[in-house]
Amino acid sequence: MVGSALTRRLAAEDCEIITATRKDADLTRQAEVEAWMAKARPQAVFLPAAKVGGILANGTYPAQFIYDNLMIATNVIHAARMVGVEKLLFLGSSCIYPKMAPQPIREEALLTGPLEPTNEWYAIAKIAGIKLCQAYRRQYGSDFISAMPTNLYGPGDNFNLETSHVIPALMRKAHEAKERGDKEMTIWGSGSPRREFLHVDDAANALVHLMTHYSDEQHVNVGSGTDLTILKLTQTIADVVGFKGEIVKDTSKPDGAPRKLMSADKLKAMGWHPEISLEQGLANTFEWYMSNNSR
């Protein structure tokens, strides 16, 4: 999803876009990554590739989440340095922050407390990626930077209910409930946790902005600066989809962290601001899903 959004965004720039698909290289395999880098010789690298998923996927596949993401970060960052890449931007996730971090979460909160247990495997791998960029900057002078996007959504998202994040999962559930004529749909947990969301096209704009305007060791938050409860999000998605039934809470399921709102003050001070409202973004995403849900 993020890679596709970056490709769309970079098409407006005066640059040649080089992509590494799964057919070109398995990023968890060092030899394949080094061979691709040596052949392609990119000047700048965006690294959004990752194994991602929601609470269910993280709990079901913890070994895959930590191994795959550690390998992707290690192999790409090391190979980039070996071939002399001028600049690299590594993408993390808001889950890197402590579960009970003060809100809104500032960049300085990293490693100040315990992680949220439901996604710590993914978080540890992403923290390692940040530290890799910092270490290569310190030891080799590599201009490698990191950005921490909030929860992203949009065209190209993953709508598999076993591995998807909250927005595509809720959108698919609401649509299928509407199609069946159900009088209710069930959501995990109490509905009270608050989450922040950013459309992937806004995120792509932010990442290009950072690539061209930022060079420092500290990672930078990429977020909208506003949040809402999962229950309110579900109601908003139901309105977009056209589901009129009741929303039922399954409180036997975990909530995850009570709140995750990131401070985007650092990025906004550099001149970037989001442009797509949540309602606009959800409508855009649902339109994409309806055109592609046969996949």
Image (cartoon, rainbow, N blue to C red):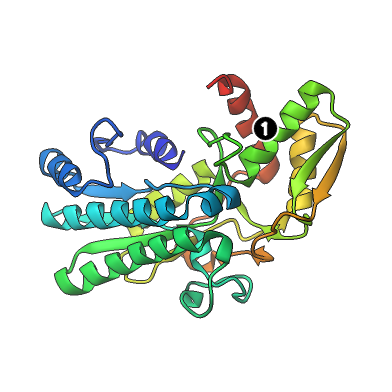
User: In the rendered image, which quarter is residue 283 located in?
Assistant: top right
Q: Amino acid at mark 1?
A: Arg
Compared with 134, 147 (above or below) is: above
Q: Residues within 10 Å of mark 1 (few under 14, many from 20)?
A: many
Q: Is residue 172 left or right of residue 187?
A: left
Residue 120 seen in render = yes
Q: Is residue 31 left or right of residue 50?
A: left
Q: Nearer the viewer, residue 144 or 62?
A: 62
User: In the rendered image, which quarter is residue 294 located in?
Assistant: top right
User: Residue shown at 29%/54% (left/top)?
Assistant: 71
User: Residue shown at 11%/38% (left/top)?
Assistant: 39
Find residue 151 and report its horizontal and vertical position in percent: 56, 52
Find residue 281 and report its horizontal and vertical position in percent: 63, 39
User: Residue shown at 88%/31% (left/top)?
Assistant: 183
Q: Nearer the viewer, residue 132 or 205?
A: 132
Residue farthest along the bottom direction in this orientation: 112
Q: Which residue is mark 1?
A: 172
Q: Is residue 132 left or right of residue 158?
A: left
Find residue 52 and report its horizontal and vertical position in percent: 47, 47
Find residue 148 and report its horizontal and vertical position in percent: 46, 60
User: Residue shown at 54%/33% (left/top)?
Assistant: 155
